[in-house]
Image (cartoon, rainbow, N blue to C red):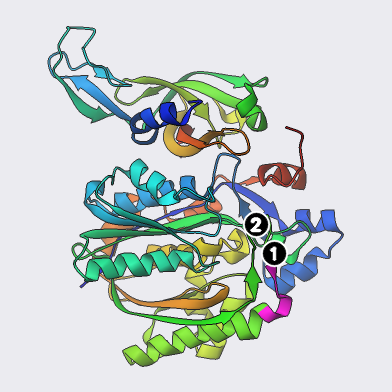
Amino acid sequence: MSTPSRYWREIPQRYRLEANSCTKCKQKFFPPRLICPECGSRDLVKTKIAEKGKVISYTIIRVPPSQFKDQAPYAVGVIELDDGVKLMGQIVDCDFEDLKLGKRVKIEFRKLFKKGHSGILCYGYKFVPDS
Amino acid sequence: MEGIVGYGAYIPRNRIKVEEIAKVWGADAPSYKKGLILEEKSVPSPDQDTITMSVEASKNALKRAGIDPIDIGAVYVGSESHPYAVKPSGTVLAEALGATPEVHTADFEFACKAGTEGMFVALNLVKAGIVTYGLGVGADTSQGAPGDALEYSAAAGAAAFIFGRDKVVAEVLDTYAYMTDTPDFWRREYEYYPQHGGRFTGEPAYFKHVIGAAKGIMNKAGMQAGDFNYVVFHQPNGKFPFRAGKILGFSRQQIEPGWLVNKLGNTYSGSSPLGLTATLDIAKPGDNILLVSYGSGAGSDAFILKVTSRIDAVRNLAPLTRELLNNNKKYLEYGEYAKFREKIRKAD
C-alpha cells in the first residue's frame, strides 16, 4: 500500500471487503481470484466476507514498521470470520488484558497509516471487540 | 412526505476529563466544570478521523434504513476537520459504503454547522426528485489550542442521516436558515488551531443565530415551544443550550434527551446531529422535534421533524447513541491525549 495506485487497486477489499466465490465448489476467496484453485473453474461470482468473527491467534507488536510507530504497542490477530474466511488485521479498542482466543470481534473502518507528512492517507479494515 | 429513513451515530471510546486538562495548565477544574457544565470529552484514536467516523456512522444509518447503498444519489460530509486540504472526504465515504460511481458528492465546511448543511442539501435533493436517497453526515475531530478554553470541549464524533421518501422514520415538516457575517471563530489557511472572540461568541453569535433560527422556523410553521416534545440545539458547552432553551420557552425535559455535551464535549459538525440521534433513540411515534444547529461565522439551520411509527422497528438495528457514549470508555492522561491529537512536536 505504499503507492497511490496500489492503494487504489485494493480499495474494493480494504473498504468494502469484496471477495468472490466459486459457483461450483462454493469456495470463497479474499482477495478475489480469477480461477478457483480447488476445482479450476472460472465461474466465480462477487460476494463479501462476513464482518464478524473470533480471534484464533494474536500477538502484540512492540517494535513496529516505521509507518506504525505511533500506534505501538498494538495487537495483530488472525480472525476466523463467521463465514470461515481467516483474515489477519490489527485489533484495536481492546485492552491487551481483555484479548483472548475466541474473543468476538467485528470489522471497523479505520486509518491504517499515513504516507509521511504529505502523502496519501490509507484507510481500511481493523477489528474491534464485538460487544 | 420526505424525511429521515435511517440515522446512525459514532463516538470514539477515548475520553479525557476536565480535571486532567486543567491540571496541566494550572487552571481551576471546578470553575470550568461549573461554568461550562462539562465533565469530560471524547478523543479520537490516531487511526480515527472525520472520514473513518463518517463511514461508521453512515453504516449504522444504512442498517436502520435497510436500503441498498447503490441507491444513494448524494453523499455530503460536513466537517471543519476534513483530513485532506485537497481531496474529498465524501469520495472515501461513498466508496466505503458502495454508493459509487453514480453519486453526487461534496464536502461542506461552516464551523460547527457543516453537518446540518449536508443534511439540508441531501433532503432538498430528495424533495426535488433528483435523488432517491441522500446522505448527510456531520463529523469532526475538532481542534482546541493547548491551554485554551476550547481544549476542554473540542471533541470527536459523527452522525449520519439518510433522507428519502419511503419508509421514513421522521418526516421533515419544515426547514429554515438564519445567517449573518459574524467573525466569532475562525481558522486561517495553514493554521493548526482556530481562534475565537471569547465572550463575543455568545450574545451576537450563538444566541442571536440559534434564537433567530428557532423563532423563524416556529413562526413559519405556526408552532410554539409547547408544540414540541424535544428540542436539540448546538452544544458548544453545557450551558448555552439550556440558556437558549429558556429564552425560547423550552423546558429542561425537552432539551435533556439530546443534550450530550457534558460527557461528550463539543463534536462541532457532529454536535446537534448527534443530539438528534440520541433524541430519535427515545422518541415515540407522533413526537415533534426541533433541531437548531449553529456554526460560527455565523449561522443556524433549523429543522422540524415528526417521528413516525417506523421508529420502533428500526431503533435497535444499530447502536444507540447513549450506549456509544457510556460503554467501553477509556480514560486518557494528558500525555497520551497530546500524542493522539498530534500536539507534540517530533523529529521526522
The subunit carrying tag 2 is: B
Task: Say if residue B289 shows up in the picture.
Answer: no
Residue in view at x 50 percent, y 69 percent: B113
Q: Is residue B149 above or below residue A80?
A: below
Q: Nearer the viewer, residue A118 or A126?
A: A118
The subunit carrying tag 1 is: B
Q: Say which quarter of the image contains residue B202.
A: bottom right
Q: Which residues are magenta?
A: B195-200
Q: Position of residue B156 (x, y in %)?
A: 57, 54
Residue type, mark 1 in image: Leu
Q: Residue furthest right?
A: B26
Q: Position of residue A80 (x, y in %)?
A: 39, 21
Q: CA distance from mark 1 to mark 2?
A: 8 Å
Label whose residue precedes the other's in the sequence (1 or 2): 2
Compared across the picture, whether B38 is left or right of B124 comes to right
Residue in view at x 37 percent, y 28 percent: A9
Q: Position of residue B14 (x, y in %)?
A: 61, 47
Residue type, mark 2 in image: Gln
Q: Circle 2 sits in a helix, a strand or a loop, which is it?
A: loop
Find disc 2 in the rendering and name its residue.
B143
Q: Is residue B273 above or below residue B9?
A: below
Category of crowding for the residue at label 1, using alpha-carbon neighbours closer than 10 angstroms: few (below 14), some (14–19), many (at least 20):
many
Mark seen at residue B150: 1
